[in-house]
């Protein structure tokens, strides 16, 4: 497919990423706008804290799928050169849609952790599995989802460098994702420094 097809694929990936599963869950289950409850964030953590664990798990899976589907299949559907760059670009467009959705006038989305996890889970299941284990261990040890998310981002970069080489495409992409995750959690870092970050299981400002 020509360049127009690839650009179309990027637009479609962005629209897929913009699908507001957290918002839809709030409307369907409680008749509320999650942007006005909890952290005000349209991510899985706010869903879990506000709507409960089952809803949070479902939204987490759907948000991850928003990243995995474009990464796995859009190169075949819309075109792109061999290698990981085009799958990664389609995945990045989905992440951008989740963080800055069109329906919210490019604001008011989630922090992109679950969608980024879906992207790298599709690109490198082994590195993703290591990052997931780090996430679970850190959340279990600290009870801070934000700490687990940032730690998993760093672990993803380190694991990718070890598995594929520090100058590999996957390692470079993992570094970008790690920086992105820390950047979107800058407010959480400020709350951690002040001792105000809510722990997992408590209803308060979310981390995603």
Image (cartoon, grey):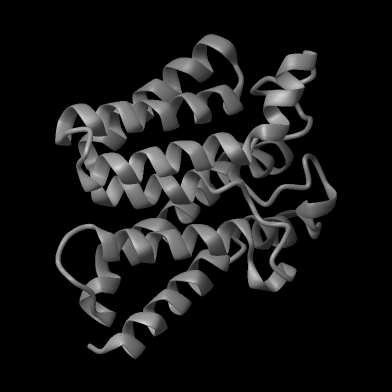
Percent position (x, y) of residue 115?
Answer: 47, 51
Residue 13 in view (yes/no): yes
Residue, x 69% and y 66% (percent of image)? 106
Q: Is residue 168 left or right of residue 68?
A: left
Number of marks: 0
Q: Residue at x 27, y 60 (%)?
A: 85
Where does the image place residue 176, in percent across and percent down from the top left? 42, 43
Q: Is residue 78 found left or right of 193 in the rendered image? A: left
* Residue furthest out toward the front: 167
Residue at the outermost right position: 36
- Residue 33: give x, y in percent of width and height: 80, 58
Residue at 25% from the left image edge and 45% from the top image edge: 170
Residue drawn at x 30%, y 26% is 158
Relative to residue 63, is residue 28 drawn left or right?
right
Using residue 10 as the reference point, say whether residue 75 is left or right of it.
Answer: left
Would residue 69 be visible to someone looking at this image? no
Q: Is residue 57 above or below residue 203?
A: below
Q: Which of 189/172 is in front?
A: 172
- For the N terminus, give its image quadrant: bottom left
Where does residue 207 sit, x and y in percent of width and height? 66, 34
Q: Is residue 135 above or below residue 74?
A: above
Residue extending furthest toward the top: 141
Q: Nearer the viewer, residue 68 or 28?
A: 68
Q: Identify which residue, 58 or 112, lies in the foreground.
A: 112
Residue 14's place in the image compared with 117, above or below, is: below
Quadrant containing the C terminus is top right
């Amino acid at each position: 497919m020509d360049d127009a097809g690839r650009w179309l694929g990027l637009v479609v990936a962005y629209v897929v990423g913009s699908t507001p599963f957290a918002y839809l869950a709030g409307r369907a289950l409680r008749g509320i706008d999650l942007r006005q409850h909890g952290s005000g964030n349209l991510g899985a953590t706010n869903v879990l804290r506000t709507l409960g664990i089952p809803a949070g798990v479902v939204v987490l899976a759907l948000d991850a799928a928003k990243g995995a589907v474009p990464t796995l299949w859009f190169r075949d559907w819309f075109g792109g050169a061999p290698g990981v760059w085009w799958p990664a670009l389609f995945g990045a467009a989905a992440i951008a849609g989740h963080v800055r959705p069109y329906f919210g006038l490019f604001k008011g989305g989630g922090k992109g952790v679950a969608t980024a996890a879906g992207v790298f889970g599709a690109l490198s299941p082994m590195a993703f599995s290591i990052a997931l284990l780090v996430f679970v261990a850190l959340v279990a040890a600290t009870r801070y989802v934000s700490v687990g998310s940032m730690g998993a981002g760093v672990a993803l970069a380190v694991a990718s460098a070890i598995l594929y080489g520090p100058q590999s495409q996957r390692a470079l992409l993992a570094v970008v994702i790690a920086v992105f995750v820390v950047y979107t959690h800058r407010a959480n870092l400020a709350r951690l420094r002040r001792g105000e970050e809510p722990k997992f299981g408590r209803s308060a400002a979310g981390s995603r």
